[in-house]
Image: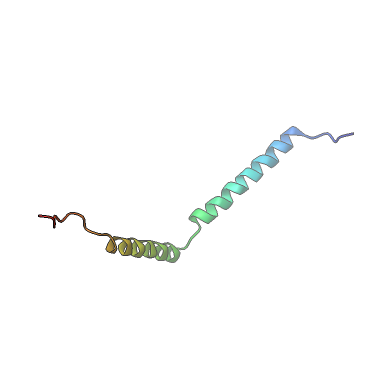
Amino acid sequence: MSDVVNLKGARKAKARADAEAKAQANRIAYGRTKTEKRTSKAEREAADRKLDGHKRDDDSDDDD
């Protein structure tokens, strides 16, 4: 035979598990120090500058 399950307890356990999963995701997304945020922003800006520096200018009309 199967065991009797209290649905109220099961719902609460599921809600706790969902809340913990959301909290873990938020720790990853928002749990960085100010120094880590600055470093990643500086790296991203440097990569953007490097990419912009390698772009060709197609605005000039040299075929005249």
- Single out the residue that lies furthest toward the right: 1
- Single out the residue that lies furthest toward the left: 64
Q: Residue at x 27, y 60 (%)?
A: 55
Q: Position of residue 40 (x, y in %)?
A: 42, 63
**Image quadrant containing the C terminus:** bottom left
Q: Quadrant of residue 8?
A: top right
* Vertical side of 37 occupied by 3: above or below: above
Q: Is residue 3 left or right of residue 12?
A: right
- Single out the residue that lies furthest toward the front: 63
Q: Residue at x 48, y 60 (%)?
A: 32
Could you say which is closer to the camera, residue 50 or residue 41?
50
Q: How many marks?
A: 0
Q: Position of residue 42 (x, y in %)?
A: 37, 65
Q: Position of residue 12 (x, y in %)?
A: 68, 39
Could you say which is closer to the camera, residue 60 or residue 26?
60
Q: Is residue 54 left or right of residue 7?
A: left
Could you say which is closer to the camera, residue 17 or residue 45?
45
**Image quadrant containing the N terminus:** top right
Q: Quadrant of residue 59?
A: bottom left
**Colour style of the rendered protein structure:** rainbow
Q: Residue at x 57, y 50 (%)?
A: 23
Could you say which is closer to the camera, residue 21 or residue 16?
21
* Vertical side of 1 occupied by 60: above or below: below
